[in-house]
Amino acid sequence: MKRFELIAIVSFLAFAHPAGARPAPWYKWQGADGDTVCAQTSPGPGWVRLEVTYVDPRCMRRDIRAAGNAKAKSRK
């Protein structure tokens, strides 16, 4: 039984790896009347997503990693 447990633990550790997932970005959305809201998905029809991404639900801190990725894509 000890040998089976050892094999199970070793195989689990060999195939386990960090997921590396990040939370979804937040965006400012602007309505037709000029109002803005902060949301991860569109509030509904008629709302336009502004290009800057944020890392908090109040849209206070910009996501500098996403900005760097956008610059890298534009250079290609």
Image (cartoon, grey):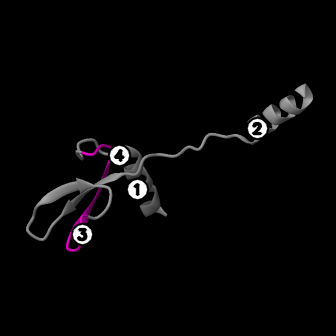
Sequence order check, earlier mark of 4 and 2: 2
Name the residue rendered at 27%, 55% in the picture: 39
Q: Is residue 12 left or right of residue 28?
A: right
Sequence order check, earlier mark of 4 and 1: 4
Residue topped by disc 2? 12
Residue topped by disc 3? 44
Tell me the CA gap for discs 4 and 2: 34 Å
Q: Which amino acid does label 4 sit on?
A: Asp
Sequence order check, earlier mark of 2 and 1: 2
Which numbered tag is attached to residue 71?
Answer: 1
- CB of mark 2 within 8 Å of CB of mark 3? no
Tell me the CA gap for discs 2 and 3: 44 Å
Sequence order check, earlier mark of 3 and 1: 3
Query: For the residues carrying marks 3 and 1, which lies nearer the camera in this image?
Result: 3
Dot 3: within a 10 Å radius of its alpha carbon, few (fewer than 14), some, or many (20 or more) residues?
few
Locate residue 60: give its quadrant. top left
Sequence order check, earlier mark of 4 and 3: 3
Does 21 appear above or below 14? Answer: below
Which numbered tag is attached to residue 63?
Answer: 4
Q: Which amino acid does label 1 sit on?
A: Lys
Tell me the CA gap for discs 2 and 1: 39 Å
Dot 3 falls on a residue whose secondary structure is loop
Dot 4: within a 10 Å radius of its alpha carbon, few (fewer than 14), some, or many (20 or more) residues?
some
Locate residue 70: give its quadrant. bottom left
